[in-house]
């Protein structure tokens, strides 16, 4: 199998689930960082199609989504000559390591993971924050939407990372708990087998804090299941409409009035796409009550389009070339498997799984 030159660079690993088109949250939380890192690190980026299975996608849709994300990676500027780009399911070593690693992962700690509780609540139609969710899950034995794959999601993610012995894992804020679990599983493995085999992978944000891109609906983060997304693939008209409809409030009535959450969200988005200087102008206008939300939204839409439209053009172009897409991930899988096979061989050896 092909192994690429490492040159002793730090190893970077990250992935995105193939559950639909990429939005600004994925872009600023993850993909734009991938692109910025590709010249300086030994980067490996993948499409998490096995993780997508936890929410039971239609098989044909899943397959198309994998190609969509791949085209979006490439259109955003990921260069297959500089990075290893692959599909998770093309590297079966990850699945075997997932089985092995699960022997050192507690059901209790998995059930307490925020993303699991969140998804389980949604699957069971429970809104409350009640900590009784564990009881609800156990009581509801036939609901296969709260499946074992969903529970062991963090183990699979840990194996994605550890199989590459990654140093940095560029992800958004919402994935930090999973990263924390990865470090916990790694050090538990090391302690149990009295080894220092695995390191402690950390998030990477160019020295800044982890990013949480808000939605346009005034509530929490931008997310596919929240239905509040701006997609990289959105056309100009759709995108402008979404931004102009973003939730705001009645506007400041007294100078220095605190900013409401929906308006703060727009400032946060503006910071990302327009830069701090522009945002500061609007913040000042808010502070002296001269702000006009309509103008601010127009500016925001304009600046988002400057980022997304060129990417959209390239997505449409690359997505239609399936032969090229296939070539990229076939080579990527070869390269990723070479590293994964080495780690899996070591892990099996450490755990005592040997041929007789
Ligand atoms: P996923 O597919 O939900 O999201 C992909 C990436 O986008 C980031 N993200 C955001 N960042 C900021 N603000 C938002 N509103 C926002 N929405 C999404 C996520 O933080 C993530 O970085 N479990 C992962 C996929 C995965 C993975 C891995 C990642 C599987 N194995 C190994 C890194 C390493 C996930 O579901 O991401």
Image (cartoon, helix red, strand yellow):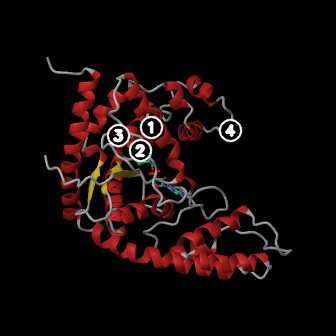
Residue at the disc numbered 4: 129
Do the residues bearing badges 3 and 2 touch, measured as CB atoms within 8 Å? Answer: yes
Q: Is residue 340 left or right of residue 202?
A: left
Q: Position of residue 214 (x, y in %)?
A: 60, 61
- What crowding class fits label 1: few (fewer than 14 Cα within 10 Å), some (14-19), or many (20 or more)? many
Q: Is residue 183 left or right of residue 162?
A: right
Label 3 vs label 4: CA separation? 32 Å
Do the residues bearing badges 1 and 2 touch, measured as CB atoms within 8 Å? Answer: yes
| Dot placed on the residue nearer the N-terminal end, 3 or 2 | 3
Residue at the disc numbered 2: 201
| Dot placed on the residue nearer the N-terminal end, 4 or 1 | 4
Q: Is residue 282 above or below residue 25?
A: below
Label 3 vs label 1: CA separation? 9 Å
Give the numbered dot on residue 183: 1
Residue at the disc numbered 3: 162
Q: Residue at x 35, y 24 (%)?
A: 194
Give the numbered dot on residue 291: none
């Amino acid at each position: 199998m092909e192994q690429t030159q490492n040159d002793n660079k730090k190893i970077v690993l990250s992935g995105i689930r193939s559950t639909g088109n990429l939005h600004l949250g994925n872009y600023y939380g993850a993909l734009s960082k991938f692109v910025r890192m590709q010249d300086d690190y030994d980067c490996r980026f993948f499409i998490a199609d096995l993780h997508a299975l936890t929410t039971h996608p239609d098989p044909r849709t899943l397959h198309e989504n994998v190609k969509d994300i791949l085209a979006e990676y490439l259109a955003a500027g990921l260069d297959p000559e500089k990075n290893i780009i692959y599909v998770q399911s093309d590297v079966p070593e990850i699945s075997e390591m997932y089985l092995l690693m699960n022997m050192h992962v507690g059901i209790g700690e998995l059930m307490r993971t925020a993303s699991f509780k969140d998804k389980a609540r949604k699957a069971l139609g429970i809104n409350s924050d009640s900590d009784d969710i564990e009881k609800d899950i156990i009581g509801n034995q036939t609901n296969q939407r709260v499946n074992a794959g969903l529970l062991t999601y963090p183990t699979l993610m840990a194996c994605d990372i550890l199989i590459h012995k990654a140093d940095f894992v560029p992800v958004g804020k919402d994935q930090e708990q999973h990263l924390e679990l990865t470090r916990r599983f790694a050090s538990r493995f090391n302690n149990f087998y009295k080894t220092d085999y695995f390191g402690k992978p950390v998030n990477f944000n160019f020295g800044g804090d982890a990013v949480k891109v808000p939605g346009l609906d005034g509530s929490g983060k931008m997310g596919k299941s929240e239905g509040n997304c701006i997609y990289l693939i959105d056309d100009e008209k759709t995108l402008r409409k979404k931004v102009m409809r973003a939730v705001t409030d009645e506007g400041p009535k007294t100078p220095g009035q605190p900013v409401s959450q929906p308006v703060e969200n727009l400032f946060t988005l503006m910071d990302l796409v327009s830069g701090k200087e522009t945002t500061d102008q609007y913040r000042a206008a808010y502070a002296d009550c001269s702000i006009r939300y309509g103008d601010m939204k127009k500016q925001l839409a304009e600046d988002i389009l400057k980022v997304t439209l060129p990417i959209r053009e390239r997505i449409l172009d690359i997505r239609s070339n399936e032969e090229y897409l296939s070539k990229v991930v076939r080579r990527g899988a070869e390269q990723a498997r070479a590293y994964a096979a080495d780690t899996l061989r070591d892990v099996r050896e450490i755990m005592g799984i040997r041929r007789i």
